[in-house]
């Protein structure tokens, strides 16, 4: 019998400002600018949450973790990813793989990708080689290229054996 599969797409964006830390993929990245948001504003983890929720038609991260709810103020997005994963697992689904793209002009993050993959794989209970994280600049165009914001896109495959 063929396994049942579903695919979800996630997207998130946050403004970059001085005076905030930059969290990507569950780790702190040294940077002059950080992402502004109600939580720690980890666009990568938020996009992965949205991808998993979308695959199961469960809405988006804002429905489950409202930016008007004080319990989520400055929350570590690893907690949001874990809660989203628990929801997915509670419905009988497993994560097959996650493919992500970060769009930011600076800082360069290639050296941090292995650690991000490790953090995410640990939360999603999959192997690190089932997590792909790519980064690209916006060639100095648009809000990401002008360093006014950062964005992330994620695709997640879920399956039921």
Image (cartoon, rainbow, N blue to C red):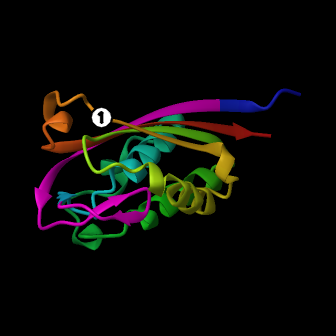
Q: Position of residue 13 (x, y in %)?
A: 25, 42
Residue at the (67%, 58%) spot, across then down: 125
Rendered image quadrant of residue 151: top left
Q: What residue sits 33% from the left and 58% below the top?
A: 65
Q: Residue at x 89, y 28 (%)?
A: 1
Left or right of 36 on screen, residue 28: right
Residue furthest to the right: 1
| Residue 21 magenta | yes
Residue 114: x and y in percent read 55, 55
Quarter the C terminus occupies? top right
So how many labels did they put on this image?
A: 1
Residue neighbourhood size for the residue with mark 1, other residues' Cα within 10 Å, grouped as few (<14), some (14–19), many (≥20): some
For mark 1, give the secondary structure: loop
Judge from the rendering whether residue 142 lies leftward or rightward of residue 65; answer left or right.
left
The answer to whether one can see residue 116 in this image is yes
For label 1, the residue is 137
Any part of residue 93 in sight? no
82, above or below 152, in the image:
below
Kindly indicate the quadrant of the structure image that contains residue 149.
Answer: top left
Magenta region, residue range: 6-32
Residue 144 lies in magenta, yes or no? no
- Magenta stretch secondary structure, dominant: strand
Instruction: Locate residue 48 relative to residue 41 in the image: left or right.
Output: right
Between 107 and 50, the one nearer to me in the picture: 107
**Residue 10 spot, x, y in % from top left:** 41, 37
Image coordinates for residue 20, horizontal then vertical, percent: 17, 66
25 or 92: which is nearer to us?
Answer: 25
């Amino acid at each position: 019998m063929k396994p049942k599969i579903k695919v979800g797409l996630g997207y998130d964006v946050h403004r970059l400002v001085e005076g905030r830390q930059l969290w990507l993929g569950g780790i702190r990245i040294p940077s002059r600018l950080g992402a502004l948001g109600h939580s720690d504003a980890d666009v990568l983890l938020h996009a992965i949450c949205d991808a998993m929720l979308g695959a199961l038609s469960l809405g988006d991260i804002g429905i489950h973790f409202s930016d008007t709810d004080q319990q989520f103020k400055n929350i570590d997005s690893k907690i949001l990813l874990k809660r989203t994963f628990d929801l997915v697992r509670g419905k009988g689904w497993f994560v097959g793989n996650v493919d992500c793209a970060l769009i930011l002009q600076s800082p360069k993050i290639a050296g941090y990708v292995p650690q991000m993959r490790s953090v995410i794989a640990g939360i999603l209970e999959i192997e690190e080689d089932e997590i792909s994280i790519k980064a690209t600049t916006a060639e100095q165009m648009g809000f990401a290229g002008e360093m006014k914001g950062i964005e992330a896109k994620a695709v997640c495959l879920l399956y039921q054996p």
